[in-house]
Amino acid sequence: MAAKMHKMFIGGKWVDAADGKTFEDMNPYTREVYAHLSAAKREDAKRAIEAAQAAFPRWAATPPSANAKSSSRQRTSWRDGRMNWSER
């Protein structure tokens, strides 16, 4: 099984680490590389925080029922594989 590359979800997009570095996630039983993950650093955390701060006013102005519906749709899409994982 080929190892998959997983990006970070920041600002509504799947992105690589700012420096492009990754690390391997190993299956502890088989010792095979299961995935390659973006190796987030301080700059990446800063990008995520800035994206969250930018999104907060709109999110805070949205009624809780609408936020709950949106979160539920996202979870269902991710769980059922309808999200475009090729962008990761």
Image (cartoon, rainbow, N blue to C red):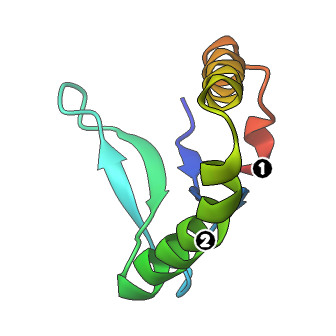
The quadrant in which residue 13 appears is bottom right
Apparent side of residue 44 relative to residue 26 in the rendered image (left or right)? right
- What element does badge 2 sit on? helix
Does 59 appear above or below 47?
Answer: above
Q: Nearer the viewer, residue 23 or 53?
A: 53
> Which residue is located at x 28 percent, y 33 percent?
27
Q: Earlier in the sequence, mark 1 or mark 2?
A: 2
- Residue that numbered label 2 is attached to: 51
Q: Give above or below for 25 relative to 70.
A: below
Nearer the observer, 85 or 2: 85
Residue 32: x and y, percent?
A: 33, 38
Q: Find disc 1 in the rendering and name its residue.
A: 87
Q: Amino acid at mark 2?
A: Ala
Amino acid type, residue under disc 1 in the picture: Glu
What is the x, y in percent for residue 20?
56, 80
- Percent coordinates x, y for residue 48 in the rendering: 51, 70
Instruction: Between label 1 and label 2, give the one nearer the viewer.
Output: 2
